[in-house]
Amino acid sequence: MSKPGLETLIEATLFGAGRSMTPEELAEGLSADVIEVIHALNSLHSSLKRRRGGAVQLSEVGHRWALEVKPKLADYLPQSAKPTVSEAHLKTLSLIAYHQPMSQTRLVELLGPRAYDHVRALSNAGLIDRRRDGNTRRLSTTRRFSEMFGCPHSDKGKVRKWWREQVDKAGLTQGAERPAALAPDTGQTLLPVSEEE
């Protein structure tokens, strides 16, 4: 049996890893040239896009590449195959994404003491970053958040802008209501919060 092509090896590596990887990580792991890996990633991206009836897509977020299920298929998957974030945690995550960087103190003012448990769970899931900032923590989304929700950015300012656009498209910014927001890839719309930051 001859050695599989670089595209095939990259697809298998990303599938097996179950996480995003940089072209440099892929090149090192596959003993290949980074430029060749980048070309193969772009070629694989095109191939998967053209694949009729395909279930996965190759996405790039912040110079990292990952294989993921196409968002249009998410509603058809069994619950056990979907990322698990409770509705309460999604509400908290949405607030953080919309207002990031957001102080944990402000989040607690909006949600009460349960926010501490939510922040811990979301941080453990790799969806938010919590950095010490004086007497509080500064909360923001991570690359994993972008991958999970199909956001094409990893820069926090761009993620915030993108998330706000998603909320506007869902019509959650009317009147005095502030969005707790929309979780686009899961199809879940969350209740708005009426308090301003």
Image (spheres, rainbow, N blue to C red):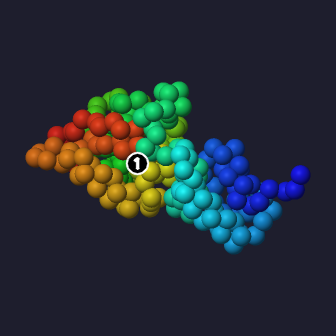
Question: Looking at the image, which residue is at 74% across and 61% down?
Answer: 6
Please state which of residues 27 and 137 is positioned toward the viewer in this rendering: 27
Question: Looking at the image, which residue is at 41% across and 50% down?
Answer: 140
Give the residue furthest to the left. Answer: 175
Question: Residue 123: percent from the left, percent from the top?
Answer: 49, 40
Q: Secondary structure at mark 1?
A: strand
Give the residue furthest to the front. Answer: 52
Question: Looking at the image, which residue is at 44% across and 60% down?
Answer: 153
Question: Looking at the image, which residue is at 71% across and 70% down?
Answer: 36
Specify the amino acid type for callout 1: Leu
Q: Within the image, what quadrant is residue 104 found in?
A: top left
Question: Residue 157: percent from the left, percent from the top?
Answer: 37, 61
Q: Is residue 139 above or below residue 37?
A: above
Report if residue 120 is visible in the image. no
Report if residue 73 is visible in the image. yes
Task: Count every numbered label the image shows and give the total.
Answer: 1
Question: Residue 185: percent from the left, percent from the top?
Answer: 41, 43
Query: In the shown orientation, is residue 137 left or right of residue 109?
Result: right
Give the residue furthest to the bottom. Answer: 35
Task: Give the residue at mark 1.
Answer: 139
Query: In the shown orientation, is residue 150 left or right of residue 31?
Result: left
Dot 1 surroundings within 10 Å: few (below 14), some, or many (20 or more)? many
Query: In the shown orientation, is residue 149 left or right of residue 95?
Result: right
